[in-house]
Image (tube, helix red, strand yellow):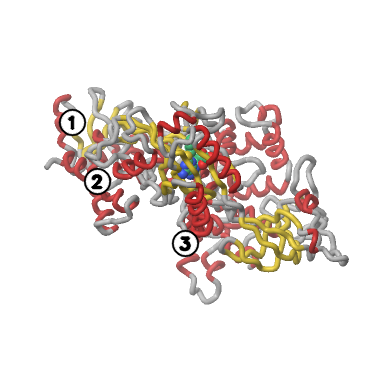
Amino acid sequence: MTEVERIYQLREELHRHNHLYYVTHSPIISDQEFDHLMAELQQLENLHPETADPNSPSVRIGSDLSQEFTQVPHQIPMLSLGNTYDREEVRDFYRRISEGLQGKPFDICCELKFDGLSISLHYEKGKLIRAVTRGDGIQGDDVTANVRTIHSIPLQLTPGSNYPETFEIRGEILMPWASFEKLNKEREAREEPLFANPRNAASGTLKNKSSKIVAGRGLDAYLYYLMGKDIPQRSHYDNLQLAATWGFQVSPHMRLARSLEEIYDFISYWEEERKNLPVATDGIVLKVNDITQQEHLGFTAKSPRWAIAYKFKAERALTCLEAVTYQVGRTGAVTPVANMAPVHLAGTTVRRASLHNEDIIKQLDLHIGDMVYVEKAGEIIPQIVGVDLKSRTEKLGKAVTFISHCPECGTQLIRYEGEAAHYCPNDATCPPQLKGRIEHYICRDAMNIDSLGPETVDEYFERGLIHDAADLYHLSVADLCGADRTRLKSAQKVVDGIAKSREVPFERVLFALGIRFVGKVVAKTLAQHFCNIDAIKTAPLEELLSVDGIGTVIAQSVKQYFGEPANITLVERLREAGVQMAVVRRETVSDHLSSQSIVISGTFIHHSRKEYAEMIELHGGKNVTSISAKTAFILAGEGVGPSKLAKAQKLGISLISEDDFLKMITD
Ligand code: IVH
């Protein structure tokens, strides 16, 4: 068998094991064996870039390449469903259907309403070709690269399973509770904002620009609507059972109901049992099962007449408001937090709830000692939604009023016009602000000093070792590990990690400074336009405003930041410490390979392929992926594939070994 034939064999095998593992949950090989096959495939694919296939099982690891999402119109609009929280309205729906069908018998397909985001998948000849979000219902975002990383979505349908040549299938992408909790735990450790619920986490993830990040987030999918002119059955239920045999994950909890009583039984059962599901659900969907009957009933402008969603009520508990405390964040924003008598709600004990801002406190007219209603409407962070006025006694507790001074440093708070939040303006010495800025500086998207975490920053801060980001560069192993030297190894790691951050490119340094409203994208824009910190520092407001993507709020914030002498000092100290304060234009070191197009193929001993690619660029050459008449030579390692060899021979292109190549560039 040739290497290329082995690639095709491995792909088919891995598709089958993926399906057995992620969809039917009945794997027949160990994880280790699976990883082994995948490694073999990846290695062979590297050797044979000509076999590249976006549906190869290896794409499931995703890529770091940033992708912009293009908008794609839906062939058939993606409508939403009519909603109800009321069983009486389910009865009305049932009656309307019965009347619409002139009393003829009908079945209702009862399904769980999965709480994620809807997706439309297109298949041609058994291959996934496109995945589009709902968007505004008329057109959505093309998120194919990200969807390809979701294991329960088949890239290639089960061979021989008789699927139509082309069809569309719609369903819900969701983040299972387990993945959601893991993700939020990681975010908490990095002090990144938490996702409020699995739905937000799933949609935030699916819109991420790096499919590698998506691949690591454990998304899942259930499909619930098969469409297209060649769909096999006139029964919605039967179509989905067939789709399951093609390789799709279809909910095992769909049931056909023949009466209103059976529908109510389904609702009652799942109102309780949904708490034991591995994924979030927010209701039940009821659909007329027969497609001819669906067509007869038709659509209103917004939703099908043949379906309705019955939504579960948010779970709610009553408890006593004992106190309101205040938290100060990195930007100085002050958040009020309700502290309550512990109460059991939707599987967890709730003690605290965010009150967001002063306006919310006023709206609720909160008094200490009030009995308050707490809700978790699929939200993981509980909310106070009201006060039980009946239980207020004559002895009304003290009204909750927003504090006037910072609980951490005592400075008088300010509330900017048009904003709901209060801020502590003392960014020079207020401890949580200082610590927060250092934590932001080291975070992954900024300087990525991953040997340090929020707890370590906290410890160093309390020990007086650091007050700002520039202090990090003066830390020594001796400072960190203390007298007993027990933590030598980890201290060395911290110091090395900090030292390495000197290589972080300027655009991320600019983001790391934590200038208000200067996020990752804005930082990149500014860095590309101005090229160095001094140009940004001295740019007049009009020049900042002339940059595409920079509006008044950002421009003013940048001016304000650099108007602050303390910030100028920090920037200078960072510069002295060796942090990048300008965009580095890569200079070529020689013109040995001037304008030559070079293909890299095979595996190497002295350097990685990436390093060789960099060397080619540094010496004036161009690294290209496919062989053509313009190719100067092939930098050939071990195991260059037969098709490449044949092509090179045909075009008379020579193969250069890595030793010869290294000589070439050093001569
Ligand atoms: S059927 C035309 N079935 O709920 C019918 N939708 O407002 C299309 N959803 O946007 C939808 N589980 O994202 C259907 N079993 C299910 C569902 C479901 C969740 C979502 C879907 C849709 C929204 C309805």
Q: Quadrant of the C terminus?
A: top left
The residues tagged by marks 3 and 2 sit, at their Cα atoms, a distance apart of 35 Å
Find numbered disc 2 in the image and state the secondary structure of the residue it sits on: helix
Residue 654's label in the rendered image is 1
Find numbered disc 3 in the image and state the secondary structure of the residue it sits on: helix
Q: Which residue is drawn at the image coordinates 45% and 56% (left, top)?
A: 278
Q: Please say if 191 is above or below 300.
A: below
Amino acid type assigned to the residue bearing label 2 in the image: Leu
Q: Earlier in the sequence, mark 1 or mark 2?
A: 2
Which of the two discs, 3 and 2, sits closer to the camera? 2
Query: What is the total number of numbered labels drawn onto the structure image?
Result: 3
- Coordinates of residue 382 in the picture (x, y in percent): 64, 57
Q: Earlier in the sequence, mark 1 or mark 3?
A: 3
Which quarter of the picture shows residue 26?
bottom left
Which residue reaches farthest right? 394
Q: Which residue is mark 2?
A: 41
Q: Please say if 241 is above or below 437.
A: above
Amino acid type assigned to the residue bearing label 3 in the image: Lys
**Few, some or many residues within 10 Å of mark 2 (<14, 14–19, 20+):** many
Q: Are marks 1 and 3 in contact (CB under 8 Å)?
A: no
Q: Is residue 383 visible?
A: yes
Q: Please say if 365 is above or below 308.
A: below
Q: Which residue is drawn at the image coordinates 37% and 46% (left, top)?
A: 249
> Is residue 479 found left or right of 22 in the rendered image?
right
**Few, some or many residues within 10 Å of mark 3 (<14, 14–19, 20+):** some
- Coordinates of residue 31 in the picture (x, y in percent): 29, 58
Amino acid type assigned to the residue bearing label 1 in the image: Ser
Q: Which residue is mark 3?
A: 493
Which quarter of the picture shows residue 547?
top right
